[in-house]
Image (cartoon, rainbow, N blue to C red):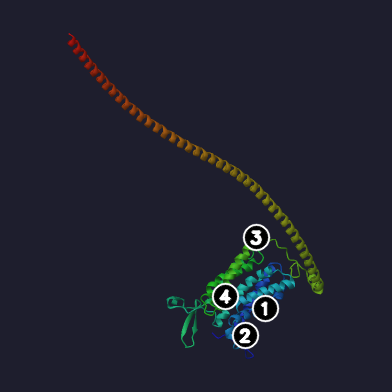
Amino acid sequence: MNPIAFYIFEKPIYWYGIIIAAALIVGVVLGVREGKRRGYRSEMIFDFLLIAIPLCIVCARIYYVIFKWSYYVSDPIKIFAIWEGGLAIYGAVIGGVIAAAIFLRWRRIPIGTMLDIAAPSIIIGQAIGRWGNYVNQEAHGIQIPYEMRALKFFPAGIKLTLEDGSIAWYYATFFYESMWNLLVFIALMIMRKKIKVRGGVFAWYALLYGFGRFFIEGLRTDSLYWGSIRVSQALSLILFVGGIAYLVIQSRRDLNYPAYNGFYSLEWTEEQIEEYRAHSKLYRANENAERAAKRVKDLKNAEKNKVKAAKENAKIVANKVDELLKKYAAENKIVIKAEEKANAAKEKVKKIEEQIKLEKEDEELSRIKEEKIKNAEEKAKKAKEKAKEIAEQIKLSDKIAAEKKQAKQSQKDKVEAKEDDDEN
């Protein structure tokens, strides 16, 4: 496709610029409507765009050039040829956030509010702007393999003519992202009235867009790299996690935000607006004075809250100390009782040991006594046996003596009998 739409005075007008301009117009119209729905005049959107458009373009280009520096270093003048493509959406988002911060300082519109108004416009602008990549034949994916040849039709794939004249089909990642962005836009338009967290719509944009871009980026052939890391995939992951973290953290805070009643309020009359413009310096001085007074009041309240919190913390600490002391005292009593019981048990053990020792001594004495008795019994037995032997010897001696006496008497009787015979 010819990237040049037409010429004006021999000056080419590129389809890429037309598509980006169309995306910008749609985004502005949508931003004006969303701002009015939230109670802001359309003038706020245009004032914001005076800051945002230049910053977004510059940051988008700087972001792209940083990661493609090897291409531009030999011909730096090409850095300014933005009509040839090379605007990174993440750089534009960064520029938008910076613009919101500047707008906060200038017009005192909260960053979260400004980003919430801009989020649907950003995502629908991205959905439209991706077709500029189609015109420039860029931001496509890898070549469609033979196994996936059923996808070789537009818009699932894109047909490109290679340098050698051959034709090849590539994944139409610009189309995938455009359709995903359109789905995210629909989701944001449905949810935006229900989201109470300031900055919540933008957080949902960040996490939903980051989720889809992470996977689509993996198919692309022209990714920006930092070493071996695809930069857009890394940032997509950061946006996804950051969006979830922001929603979780902010949902736990006070969501009763004060109503806006400033220069861009729809409730202001023409007289108030003209008076503000005529005396803008005075109004801003009063606003600064009010903000300073509010700041001082907030600081005093914060200090009071800190003192109160410190007292409460001191009270909590004191209660904890008392509890610990009581616990320590109770544990100390338990320890003392345990020590007393342990000492009593030691004394008891000592007595038992002494008793065992005495019993052992008694057993030793009994054993010695038993041995003595046993020895005495054995001696008595031996003495008895000896006495028996002596008695038997005495008895034998008495028997022998009796026999001798009897023999002597018999001899005597024989002698007497012989004498008697002799006498006779």
Query: Gap between marks 2 and 3, in whole Å?
Result: 45 Å
Q: Name the residue under label 1.
A: 55
Q: Mark 4 points at which residue?
A: 232
Q: Quadrant of the C terminus?
A: top left
Above-or-below relation of 31 to 415 = below
Q: Which amino acid does label 4 sit on?
A: Ser
Q: Mark 2 points at which residue?
A: 79
Q: Is residue 185 visible?
A: no
Residue 136 in the image: state x and y as whole percent: 56, 83
How would you rate the neighbour count of disc 4 (Cα within 10 Å): few for under 14, some for 14-19, many for 20 or more?
many
Query: Gap between marks 4 and 1, in whole Å?
Result: 20 Å
Res 341 → quadrant: top right
The front one of 324 and 20 is 324
**Contact flag, marks 2 and 4 (Cβ < 8 Å):** no
Comes first in the chain, label 4 or label 3:
4
Q: Of tags 1 and 3, which is closer to the observer? A: 3
Residue 256 in the image: state x and y as whole percent: 70, 61
Comes first in the chain, label 2 or label 3:
2
Q: Name the residue under label 3.
A: 252
Q: Which amino acid does label 2 sit on?
A: Ile
How would you rate the neighbour count of disc 1 (Cα within 10 Å): few for under 14, some for 14-19, many for 20 or more?
many
Give the secondary structure at mark 4: helix
Q: What residue type is labelled 1?
A: Leu
Query: Gap between marks 1 and 3, in whole Å?
Result: 33 Å
Query: Gap between marks 2 and 4, in whole Å?
Result: 20 Å
Point 63% across, 80% down: residue: 62
